[in-house]
Image (cartoon, rainbow, N blue to C red):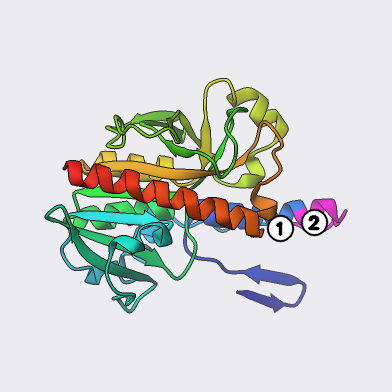
């Protein structure tokens, strides 16, 4: 939401440190490219407890008891749940089922979210009694050989906030040719993914996004399980034909539909394994 008062434009976004930083960076980058050097961009960042309160009151407080919560690219796994109706009345909505005797809930949101908001979501879920959180989404790769929309990504480590967080990856050991484990690094915004940044980190990391690290860190602090299973959507090291700029093309949608089918098979294999 944008409000203009006198000579100042106020841009309001959802309560999140990474979120606000990202949008401020996007605006500042646009202004810099437009040579609007006289326009200053200032941030008003929330405290972590304010982010928690915002997330905790966004609908998840009404989530029914569940064993497994799945976040992110919910379309990928809704085929596992009969029907097409969503429950909930807040920003978060969910669909429930049972898989392998365990209660499984796929959780969507009316807004996109990442970073510390995603970490707060995991903490709220843990407080609601959820013991396993799986994150299904899209991720960029730094590994030159990985072609976008042909590979599934997973892993057990992320560099986030100046520290390395590790966890037990429940997708480890699933035998599938498209599933490739790697090391993840967290960034607050895609604007931070500069050529200089890439030169510094590409030798030590394979995947990058803003959510995996904060979610894993939160799960670790709450002593619950966390794992991610993503499709590789773009390659930062090598320019392939498809990337985030043309991901709505028909060919990309067809490739992703096939890859999401493979993702569902891997996820189902994990859940049924217990």
Q: Name the residue under label 2.
A: 31
> Whole-Å distance between the Cαs marked 2 and 1?
6 Å
Q: In the image, 153: left or right of 58?
A: right
In the foreground, 26 or 265: 265
- Which disc number belongs to residue 27? 1
- Residue name at image x 44 percent, y 44 percent: 230
264 or 14: nearer the viewer: 264
Residue 37 in sight in this render:
no
**x, y percentage for residue 167?**
30, 32
Element on which disc 1 rests: helix
Residues 236 and 212: in front is 236
Query: Answer yes or no: do the residues labelled 2 and 1 have beta carbons within 8 Å?
Result: yes
Q: Residue 126 carries which label?
A: none
User: Local crowd at mark 2 within 10 Å, few (<14), some, or many (≥20)?
Assistant: some
Residue pushed farthest right? 35
Residue displayed at 45% across by 28% down: 183
């Amino acid at each position: 939401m944008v409000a203009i008062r006198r000579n100042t434009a106020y841009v309001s976004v959802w309560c999140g440190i990474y979120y606000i930083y990202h949008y401020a960076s996007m605006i500042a980058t646009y202004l810099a490219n437009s040579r609007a050097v006289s326009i200053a961009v200032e941030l008003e960042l929330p405290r972590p407890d304010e982010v928690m309160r915002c997330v905790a009151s966004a609908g998840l407080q009404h989530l029914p008891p569940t064993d497994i919560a799945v976040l992110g690219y919910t379309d990928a796994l809704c085929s596992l749940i009969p029907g097409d109706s969503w429950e909930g009345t807040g920003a978060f909505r969910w669909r429930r089922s049972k898989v392998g005797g365990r209660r499984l809930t796929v959780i969507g949101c009316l807004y996109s979210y990442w970073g510390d908001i995603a970490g707060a979501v995991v903490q709220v879920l843990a407080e609601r009694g959820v013991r396993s959180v799986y994150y299904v989404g899209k991720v960029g790769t730094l590994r030159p050989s990985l072609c976008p929309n042909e590979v599934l990504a997973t892993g057990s480590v992320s560099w986030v906030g100046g520290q390395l967080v590790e966890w037990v990856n429940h997708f480890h050991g699933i035998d599938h040719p498209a599933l490739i484990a790697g090391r993840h690094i967290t960034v607050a915004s895609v604007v931070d993914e500069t050529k200089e940044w890439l030169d510094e980190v590409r030798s030590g990391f394979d995947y990058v996004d803003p959510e995996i690290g904060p979610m894993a860190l939160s799960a670790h602090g709450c002593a619950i399980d966390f794992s991610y299973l993503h499709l590789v959507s773009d390659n930062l090291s090598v320019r392939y034909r498809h990337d985030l700029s043309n991901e709505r093309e028909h060919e990309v949608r067809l490739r992703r539909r096939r890859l999401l089918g493979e993702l569902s098979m891997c996820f189902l294999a994990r859940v049924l394994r217990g």
